[in-house]
Image (cartoon, rainbow, N blue to C red):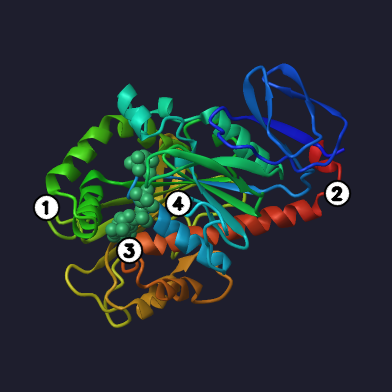
């Protein structure tokens, strides 16, 4: 008989299929209760008026789980596009599925958006007076159960939050990929979910820059008024500070985006100072460094090999502490004039986990049209993408070396 796991999902509205043809009685435990299912037909089952989702699959290769946390409009999608590109192949929504699905699937990666675990839809949040950032508007039990199931090689029927209608749509099937990325507001909020992560990233966009990006997108591209953008940022801020921002203390890598220091009192938010904060001592992750590992360096690369216009470019590298953890920081302030000259900067960075000389520059040139390609946001997102590929390859290699049975010891 197939090994089965039960996932409770009360928000489930449609029947789901049970991928087993077994006709025998199956005893499955859930929430300390023993429930009995007859897995004879491909339908969802109800027990004590509660609907259960049953998934059956014997998982033999564990999925690697990456968490990416950030507020809305802070570059998660852009980062995801860079990451999937590092693995090759395009990422697309599930074929033939809900056109408003938030999921992106490529050969190696599946990116799920944690908005899909909103337990309250738009109307529900309005009625209860809570924002989507509030944990009460999210189902962390289901998030944990499903991420764990995928990590264990088991397919799940994940709910969909529809950003167009503001409703919870019928679920979609998510099969275990090689790499699962969970991106959204709360990947590191719940300790059970956090413990499932093999690597975690937080995009820390300062208020000034967030405001500038919001204006650019929501005003220029979506026709919102300046007042409504300001009001929306203000309304989210208390919950952002309480529930989203504190997650950065748990991240293995933080990309911090600040206004430039090269122009005194700059408040345009166009030139950026970007810091890649890398935790020391994380298994399978060795931080990138500039010139000499462990030293402290300030570097202005502008000159014969790198064209810079005002206000120039400044790099910094050095050790630091971050929420009590030892970290290494690489910082870039300013922006590139010519991306093809980035190779000069790349050749001074070490531990990049690139597969060939110039891979970072090649990736940046390939996606020159993505936001942030001329500054540290694009550069550090690309580098973190390479580090994730390296982490994945190291974990796979270490599993191949581990004799069967020893892994459980
Ligand atoms: N590195 C960047 N430099 C400049 N602008 C950026 C950068 N990253 C993102 N933006 C701006 O922010 C907008 C949102 O970016 P993106 O879609 O990647 O964010 P998101 O976190 O996925 O947003 P949402 O959660 O709202 O879907 C972009 O359209 C762009 O205007
Ligand atoms: O913070 C968000 C994450 O994307 C959204 O605001 C949240 O998911 C609610 O979505 P919508 O505004 O479409 O109802």
Label 3 vs 1, first from the N-terminus: 1
Gap in Å between the C-alphas at discs 2 and 1?
A: 59 Å
Mark 2, other Cα within 10 Å: few <14 / some 14–19 / many ≥20 = few
Q: Which residue is mark 4?
A: 100
Q: Is residue 192 above or below residue 263?
A: above
Disc 3 residue lies near ligand 1 with CB under 8 A: yes
- In the rendered structure, the answer to whether residue 306 lies left or right of residue 254 reads left
Disc number for residue 248 = none
| Residue for point 17% across, 71% down | 310
Label 4 vs 3, first from the N-terminus: 4
Gap in Å between the C-alphas at discs 4 and 2?
A: 43 Å
| Residue for point 63% across, 56% down | 392
Near-viewer residue (200 or 65): 65
| Residue for point 37% across, 47% down | 164
Callout in the foreground (3, 2):
3
Disc number for residue 265 = 1
The percent coordinates of residue 315 (x first, y second) are 32, 62
Q: Which residue is mark 2?
A: 403
Q: Which residue is mark 3?
A: 372
Callout in the foreground (4, 2):
4
* Residue 351 appearing in the image: no
Gap in Å between the C-alphas at discs 4 and 1?
A: 42 Å
Q: Label 3's element?
A: loop
Callout in the foreground (3, 1):
3
């Amino acid at each position: 008989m197939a090994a089965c796991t039960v996932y409770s999902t009360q928000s489930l509205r449609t029947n789901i299929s049970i991928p087993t043809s077994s006709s025998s009685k199956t005893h499955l435990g859930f929430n300390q209760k023993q429930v009995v299912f007859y897995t004879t037909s491909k339908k969802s089952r109800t027990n004590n008026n509660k609907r259960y989702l049953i998934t059956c699959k014997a998982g033999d290769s564990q999925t690697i789980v990456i968490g990416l946390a950030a507020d809305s409009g802070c570059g998660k999608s852009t980062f995801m596009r860079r990451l999937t590109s590092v693995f090759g192949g395009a990422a697309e929504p599930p074929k033939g599925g809900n056109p408003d699905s938030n999921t992106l699937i490529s050969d190696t990666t599946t990116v799920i958006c944690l908005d899909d675990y909103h337990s309250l839809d738009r109307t529900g949040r309005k009625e209860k007076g809570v924002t989507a950032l509030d944990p009460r508007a999210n189902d962390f039990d289901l998030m944990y159960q499903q991420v764990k199931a995928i990590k264990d090689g088991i397919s799940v029927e994940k709910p969909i939050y529809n950003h167009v209608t503001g409703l919870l749509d019928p679920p979609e099937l998510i099969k275990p990929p090689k790499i699962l990325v969970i991106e959204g507001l709360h990947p590191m909020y719940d300790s059970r979910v956090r413990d499932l992560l093999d690597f975690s990233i937080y995009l820390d966009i300062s208020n000034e820059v967030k405001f500038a990006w919001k204006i650019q997108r929501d005003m220029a591209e979506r026709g919102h008024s300046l007042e409504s953008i300001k009001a929306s940022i203000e309304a989210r801020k208390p919950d952002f500070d309480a529930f989203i921002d504190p997650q950065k203390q748990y991240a293995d890598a933080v990309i911090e985006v600040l206004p430039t220091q090269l122009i005194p009192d700059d408040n345009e938010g166009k030139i950026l100072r970007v810091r890649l904060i890398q935790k020391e001592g994380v298994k399978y992750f060795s931080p990138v460094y500039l010139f000499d590992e462990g030293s402290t360096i300030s570097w202005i690369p502008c000159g014969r090999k790198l064209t810079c216009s005002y206000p120039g470019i400044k790099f910094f590298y050095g050790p630091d502490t971050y929420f009590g953890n030892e970290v290494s920081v690489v910082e870039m302030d300013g922006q590139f004039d010519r991306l093809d000259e980035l190779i000069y900067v790349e050749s001074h960075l070490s531990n990049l986990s690139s597969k060939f000389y110039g891979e970072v520059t090649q990736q940046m040139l390939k996606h020159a049209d993505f936001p942030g390609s001329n500054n540290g946001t694009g550069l550090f997102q690309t580098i973190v993408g390479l580090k994730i590929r390296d982490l994945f390859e190291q974990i796979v290699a270490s599993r191949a070396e581990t004799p069967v049975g020893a892994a459980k010891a």
